[in-house]
């Protein structure tokens, strides 16, 4: 698995999502693209601790710079705009359920635990 502009472990599958809505509760997906930021950590306990800090008002961008193991930490966890095929399924699925500005509970993927904030 290669490295791309979204960081280690995120891969493109070449699949096209078209122009679809997310369905359940999340914000609409325009042009098959989502914008999000995240924090990636190895342990669930650390992800839960970070999530509690976010609920107390700390900023995801600040915590990403401190704790995230993803190269996106240099950008405050900002992954920019991406399509379904750019991310692993669990990550994409979590993003589609979020409203813009909403922060997820920890999401497990093969890379660790993500806390995701949908930004667009």
Image (tube, grey):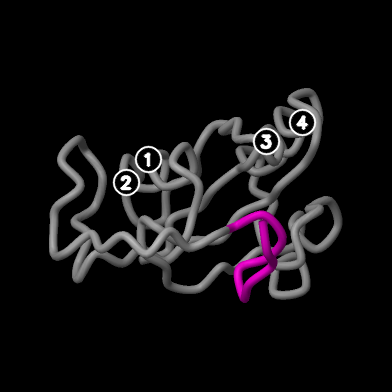
What residue is at 80 percent from the left and 36 percent from the top? 42
- Rounded to the nearest angstrom, the CA distance separating label 2 from label 1 is 5 Å
**Quick check: is 58 in the magenta stretch?**
no
The circle drawn on residue 49 is 4
State which quarter of the image contains the N terminus: bottom right
Q: Are marks 3 and 1 in contact (CB under 8 Å)?
A: no
Counting residues from the N terminus, which is met first, the one under dot 2 or under dot 3? 2
Of the pair 54 and 84, the residue shown nearer to us: 84
* Residue positioned 50% across, 38% down in the render: 104
**Residue 3 belongs to magenta span:** yes
Main SS of residues in magenta: loop
Q: CA distance from mark 4 to mark 3?
A: 12 Å
In magenta, the rendered stretch is 1-10
Crowding near pointer 3: few (<14 within 10 Å), some, many (20+)? many
Real-space CA distance between mark 2 and mark 3, rounded to the nearest whole angstrom: 17 Å
CA gap, disc 1 to disc 4? 23 Å
Compared with residue 34, is residue 27 higher up or lower down, i.e. above or below?
above
Whether label 2 touches label 1, CB < 8 Å: yes
Residue corresponding to mark 1: 93
Q: Residues within 10 Å of mark 4 (few under 14, many from 20)?
A: few
Q: Which mark sits nearer the N-terminus, 4 or 2?
A: 4
Q: Residue 113: which disc?
A: 3
Q: Position of residue 106 (x, y in %)?
A: 60, 32
Q: CA distance from mark 3 to mark 1?
A: 14 Å
Q: Residue furthest top?
A: 45
Q: Which residue is mark 2?
A: 96
């Amino acid at each position: 698995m290669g490295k791309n502009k979204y960081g280690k472990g995120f891969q493109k599958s070449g699949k096209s999502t078209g122009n679809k809505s997310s369905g359940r509760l999340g914000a609409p997906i325009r042009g098959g693209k989502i914008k999000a930021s995240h924090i990636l950590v190895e342990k669930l306990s650390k992800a839960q601790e970070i999530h509690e800090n976010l609920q107390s008002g700390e900023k995801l961008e600040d915590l990403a710079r401190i704790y995230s193991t993803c190269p996106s930490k240099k950008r405050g966890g900002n992954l920019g705009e991406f399509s379904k095929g750019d991310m692993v399924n669990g990550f994409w699925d979590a993003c589609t359920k979020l409203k813009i500005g909403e922060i997820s509970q920890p999401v497990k993927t093969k890379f660790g635990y993500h806390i995701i904030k949908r930004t667009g």
